[in-house]
Amino acid sequence: MPHTSTLTASRGVEVEIDFMIVESLSCSVSELRISVPDLVDAEFDVLRKWAEALCGKVTYLLENIGPLEFSPDSGQVLIRSNPPDQQTSATKFYEVILQSHSSGNFSLRRFESVKGRPGRKPVDITSTHELLHKLVNDLIDSIPKVN
């Protein structure tokens, strides 16, 4: 059964993980979200620094990730796999969205785009428990401190 786990870290940071499957050594996650109250309405440069720190620290996923779009007006940075996983019939990629509007949000998902079909569909992120633990810690550690 799908289950959302919520964890609270320092500075009021809240982590939500949508688990689809949990086994003894691995798990499948549909989305990982982080709410960072310190980043509500933060300057756009703070989001840019977060994106750079995040992409420099998280180098162990199936593909490297890098900033793709910076949108100062909407207070958002889009990060994706760079390059995505190109298979014969489909392309898979991670997508991270950092936002300073609303509640200072982070979202990580994985998508698949099938050749010959319009659009994309979400797919689960499968990892070991150890990798997920490292990922959550690295995501929290990459959050910039706002004065």
Image (spheres, grey):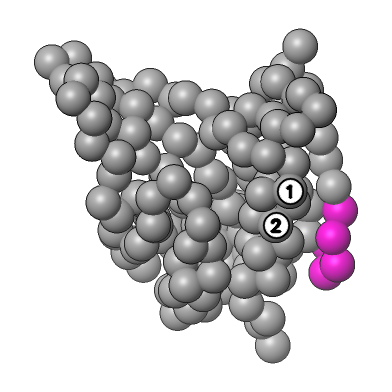
Image coordinates of residue 117 in percent, x first then y, are 18, 14
- Please tell me whether mark 1 or mark 2 is closer to you in this view: 1
Q: Residues within 10 Å of mark 2 (few under 14, many from 20)?
A: some
Q: Residue 68 in the image: x percent, y percent?
A: 29, 58
Where, by quadrant of the figure, is residue 12 drawn?
Answer: bottom right
Q: Is residue 99 magenta?
A: no
Query: Circles 1 and 2: CB distance less than 8 Å?
Result: yes
The residue under label 2 is which amino acid type?
Answer: Lys
Q: CA distance from mark 1 to mark 2?
A: 6 Å
Can you identify the residue that label 2 sits on? Answer: 134
Which percent across, then down, holds residue 75?
44, 62
Give the overall secondary structure of the magenta segment. helix
State the residue at coordinates (30%, 40%).
85
| Location of the C terminus (image quadrant) | bottom right
| Front residue of this view, candidates 130 and 114 | 130
Can the viewer see residue 30 in this picture?
yes
Numbered tag placed on residue 130 in the rendering = 1
Compared across the picture, whether 2 is left or right of 107 comes to: right
Nearer the observer, 51 or 56: 56
User: As rendered, which of 38 and 121 lies closer to the eye?
Assistant: 121
Q: Which residues are magenta?
A: 8-12
Outermost residue toward the front in this view? 25
Q: Residue visible at 86% across and 67% down?
A: 10
Alpha-carbon neighbours of circle 1 within 10 Å: few (<14), some, or many (≥20)?
few
- Asked if one can make out residue 18 in the rendered structure from this viewpoint, the answer is no
Near-viewer residue (41 or 76): 76
- Dot label at residue 39: none
